[in-house]
């Protein structure tokens, strides 16, 4: 069986995520069946290899088929694959909750599991609302969100997100939210620092909180990087101000670290760079090293206590998912966290981040690059039609897609977001591999220019 025959069988029965299926079925976009993965490399059924420069949608941290994680899952598999978490518990769920309480910022004392990122967002939203309700503040029903944010695809998560491409179609189904301008530093003035701009942008958040605090449960943000929103970035000072304002106005702060957690931004959690603790932190993606679907919401004892009462008071949080706290997922997560603790991954990532900067230095002067921006292990290149005016390429041209196709032909998996090419590689990538993937991206931009 080669690529072509797998692709045929696939197209007969499979409907792929985030895809116009006609691209594959009729318009020549290859659908690539992967046979195996090893480290940063994926191999298809024709024997082609692809450097996974985007960590398979931002989930992989320590490479495909990582021996330590493989071993941990195999041992767990022979002991217990899964058990109901209502009324029952198990060793891996307990150990992981202990670990997460230990390594996340202070005052996150209790861990609630789910099985994907969007569900973690739904849980944080419901818990925040329900907390205020249990305190007799049932009039708090709204959420404040940042423009250009992304929090997942289920209806609640989609409602608090802000990327039009994913949201607009479903607008009639979604709860109303209060949107505030993003601190996204792409729009700062030429001489303005990231910090000055992000602080300036906070004024609107402060005004909105002052006006709506009585009806607002929580503010939800992606700390430091709005990943699905074209890898737009902002300064930690915004989070520091936001924490102060949330305290002042008695509103929760929900940190969606689903994409930025576990070392992506340079610290283990992005909130650390602002020295803040959110009231809720949502974790998934890198949580299991990219192995298994699992998510967790951590919150404070104070929130936990507002639900804790006699059953008859009906204050309990009655939310559940069938695979909540799956044992294999928890074991993969424990093995992943062990890898962070058995060597100085964050120091190593600082070296890798410097190499990412070094090998993309030439992009700054490219006539169609408006900005090269970086936060830790995320580096993004914003392509524009006009460098001076920053006029964007018409989206219909699908320039990013051309870069994607070119890169695939050269053995690199890039997956541009619109006209933004980015690198978010596993933490085991080598200098030679960084050099290769950035060269291919450079050539891909030239290739996309040609037609
Ligand atoms: C991916 C993502 C989600 C949604 O997680 P899923 O597991 O895909 O449902 C939520 N928030 C952020 C910031 C994400 O990047």
Image (spheres, helix red, strand yellow):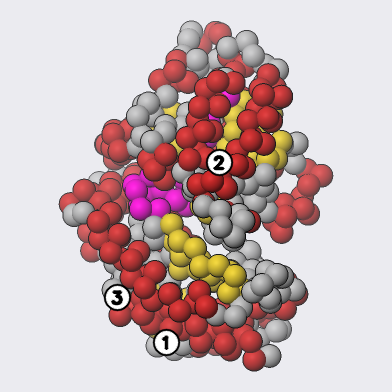
Mark 1 or mark 2: whose residue is earlier in sequence: 1
The Cα–Cα distance between marks 1 and 2, rounded to whole angstroms, is: 47 Å
Q: Which one is closest to the eye, mark 3 or mark 2? A: 2
Most distant residue in the left direction? 342
Q: Residues within 10 Å of mark 1 (few under 14, many from 20)?
A: some
5 or 181, which lies in front? Answer: 181
Identify the residue shown where x is 44% and y is 28%. 299
Q: For mark 2, what is the residue?
A: 199
> Which numbered tag is attached to residue 431?
3
Q: Measured from the top left, where is residue 360 in percent x and y?
A: 43, 74
| Chief SS of the magenta region | loop
Q: Is residue 45 above or below residue 130?
A: below
> Which numbered tag is attached to residue 269?
none
Q: Is residue 89 above or below residue 262?
A: above
Q: Is residue 262 magenta?
A: yes
Identify the residue shown where x is 46% and y is 43%. 236
Asked if the beta carbon under badge 1 is closer than 8 A to the nearest atom of ligand 1, the reply is no
293 horizontally vs 398: left or right? left
Q: Quadrant of residue 11?
A: bottom right
Q: Measured from the top left, where is residue 415 in percent x and y?
A: 54, 71
Mark 3 or mark 2: whose residue is earlier in sequence: 2
The Cα–Cα distance between marks 1 and 3, rounded to whole angstroms, is: 21 Å
Q: For mark 1, what is the residue?
A: 48
Magenta segment range? 251-269
Q: Is residue 131 visible?
A: yes
């Amino acid at each position: 069986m080669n690529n072509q025959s797998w692709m045929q069988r696939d197209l007969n029965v499979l409907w792929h995520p985030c895809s116009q299926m006609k691209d594959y079925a009729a318009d020549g976009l290859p659908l690539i069946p992967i046979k195996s993965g090893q480290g940063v490399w994926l191999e298809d059924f024709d024997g082609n290899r692809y450097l996974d420069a985007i960590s398979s949608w931002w989930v992989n941290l320590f490479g495909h088929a990582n021996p330590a994680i493989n071993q941990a899952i195999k041992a767990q598999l022979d002991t217990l694959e899964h058990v109901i978490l209502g009324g029952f518990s198990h060793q891996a769920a307990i150990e992981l909750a202990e670990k997460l309480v230990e390594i996340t910022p202070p005052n996150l004392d209790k861990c609630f599991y789910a099985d994907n990122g969007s569900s973690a967002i739904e849980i944080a939203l419901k818990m925040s609302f329900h907390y205020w309700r249990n305190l007799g503040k049932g009039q708090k029903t709204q959420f404040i969100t940042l423009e250009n944010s992304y929090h997942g695809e289920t209806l609640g998560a989609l409602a608090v997100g802000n990327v039009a491409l994913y949201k607009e179609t479903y607008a009639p189904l979604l709860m109303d939210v209060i949107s505030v301008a993003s601190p996204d530093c792409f729009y700062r003035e030429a001489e303005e620092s990231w910090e000055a701009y992000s602080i300036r942008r906070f004024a609107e958040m402060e005004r909105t909180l002052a006006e709506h605090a009585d009806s607002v449960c929580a503010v939800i943000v992606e700390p430091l990087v709005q990943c699905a929103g074209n890898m737009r970035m902002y300064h930690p000072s915004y989070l520091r101000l936001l924490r102060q304002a949330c305290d002042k106005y008695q509103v929760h702060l929900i940190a969606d670290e689903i994409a930025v957690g576990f070392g992506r931004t340079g610290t283990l959690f992005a909130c650390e760079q602002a020295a803040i603790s959110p009231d809720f932190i949502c974790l998934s993606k890198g949580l299991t090293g990219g192995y298994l679907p699992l998510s967790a919401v951590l919150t404070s004892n104070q929130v936990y206590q507002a639900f804790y009462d006699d059953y008859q008071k009906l204050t309990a949080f009655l939310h559940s998912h069938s695979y909540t706290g799956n044992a294999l997922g928890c074991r993969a997560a424990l093995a992943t966290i062990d890898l962070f603790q058995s060597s100085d991954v964050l120091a190593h990532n600082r070296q890798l981040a410097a190499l990412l900067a070094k090998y993309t230095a030439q992009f700054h002067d490219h006539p169609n690059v408006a900005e090269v921006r970086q936060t830790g292990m995320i580096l993004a290149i914003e392509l524009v039609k006009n460098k001076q005016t920053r006029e964007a390429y018409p989206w219909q041209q699908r320039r990013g897609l051309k870069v994607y196709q070119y890169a695939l032909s050269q053995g690199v998996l890039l997956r541009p977001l619109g006209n933004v090419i980015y690198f978010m590689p596993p933490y085991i990538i080598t200098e030679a591999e960084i050099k290769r993937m950035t060269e291919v991206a450079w050539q891909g931009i030239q290739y996309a220019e040609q037609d």
